[in-house]
Amino acid sequence: MTSGFSGAPGEQPVEAMAEAAVNALLHKINHPNSADTQTVFKPKLAIRQSTDPNAPSTLSI
């Protein structure tokens, strides 16, 4: 299963991941002999100074 994600840049599909985890767990509880499944999510890379020294700072002091 592949899950797309249309959230804001830099955010991860947390709700979709949680929903998939709960669904997988419930399926395994109800069908203990079923084959394991995998869910693939499309993560977003947050470009920050730790990955790009030329990126604008997101922290103002």
Image: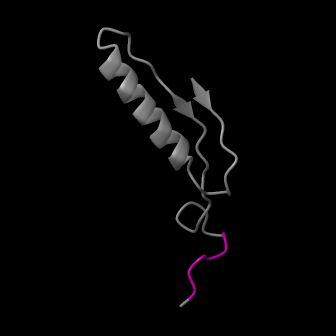
Dominant secondary structure (helix, strand or loop) of the stretch shown in magenta:
loop
Picture layout, residue 35 above or below residue 27 = above
Extreme residue in the front direction: 30
Nearer to us in this view, 41 or 31: 31
Picture layout, residue 10 above or below residue 48 = above
Whether residue 60 sits left or right of residue 9 in the image: it is: left
Image quarter where the N terminus lies is: top right
| Horizontal and vertical percent position of residue 43 | 58, 44
Nearer to us in this view, 24 or 42: 24
Q: Which residues are magenta?
A: 55-60
Whether residue 6 sits left or right of residue 36 in the image: it is: right
Picture layout, residue 42 above or below residue 9 = above
59 in the magenta segment:
yes
| Horizontal and vertical percent position of residue 48 | 59, 65
What residue is at 66 percent from the left and 69 percent from the top?
55
Report the number of numbered marks. 0
What residue is at 34 percent from the left and 18 percent from the top?
30
What is the quadrant of residue 52 in the picture? bottom right
Nearer to us in this view, 47 or 33: 33
What residue is at 56 percent from the left and 60 percent from the top?
51
Nearer to us in this view, 32 or 47: 32
Picture layout, residue 13 above or below residue 48 = above
| Horizontal and vertical percent position of residue 13 | 56, 46
What is the quadrant of residue 23 in the picture? top left
What residue is at 66 percent from the left and 42 percent from the top?
5
Extreme residue in the bottom direction: 61
Whether residue 24 sits left or right of residue 8 in the image: it is: left
20 in the magenta segment:
no
